Image (spheres, rainbow, N blue to C red):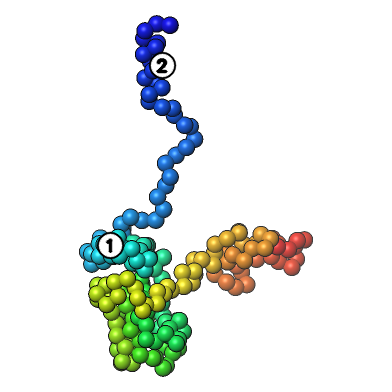
Amino acid sequence: ITAGALLFCTASAAMGIDIKGVTKPRAHGRSSPVSENIYLRLLVKLYRFLARRTGSKFSGIVLKRLMMSKINRPPLSLRRLVKFMKNKESKIAVVVGTITDDVRIHELPKLTVCALRFTEGARSRIEKAGGQCLTFDKLAMLAPTGTNTVLLRGPKNAREAVRHFGKAPGTKDSTAKPYTRSSGRRFEMARGRRATQGFHV
């Protein structure tokens, strides 16, 4: 064996081996918000600090939700808020999203609510009932570790688009809604849909 070959063998042994088919584990979720909103970015900075220094699970969850896309931060109506806060009126309701008004509910209890945003009607009704609307920076001073709070979320799958997801419409056991131009006598009435054809979907 030559000196060059010996040198190459020792260098290869020191460097290690390549393992094929193994990729670096992918990080799930966001590490920063996509939005350029400076107030949202300041909240992320604040809750990242709280999550790191307090070790609080609450702060970690709020941080993760602050960085989510708008689809993953669905609005929560006053009706659902009242329903979820029944027998918990003394606690602070925390929603990383928007609180919207709901005309279906007439009586509103006194509630303390923290949210990213309140619609004008929702804010006025909460305050009229003797409640309080908080921002997340105020919440960080009142309950930095999330003590005496109830963390809530809006219905994520309430969007109309979700009805179209799943197995293709018309296939066996499918409950997906078809994309149609309209509904009526002239639509979705091709072969397999009409009584005069030899098969039915």
Q: Is residue 42 above or below residue 28?
A: below
Q: Earlier in the sequence, mark 2 or mark 1?
A: 2
What residue occupies the far right of the structure in this picture? 198
Please, what secondary structure does the residue beneath circle 1 have? helix
Give the quarter of the figure containing the C terminus: bottom right
Marking on residue 53: 1
Marking on residue 9: 2
- Do callouts 2 and 1 mark residues in contact (Cβ within 8 Å)? no
Task: Return the x and y of residue 11 as percentages of the image width and height.
Answer: 36, 19
Residue 185 shows up from this direction: yes
Say which residue appears at 33% left-offset and 84% top-offset: 112
Q: Is residue 54 above or below residue 29?
A: below
Say which amino acid is labelled 2. Answer: Cys
**41 sits to left or right of 181:** left
State which quadrant residue 47 falls in: bottom left
What residue occupies the far top of the structure in this picture? 2
Please, what secondary structure does the residue beneath circle 2 have? helix
Residue 159 shows up from this direction: no
> Toward the viewer: 171 or 74?
74
Say which residue appears at 29% left-offset and 71% top-offset: 144
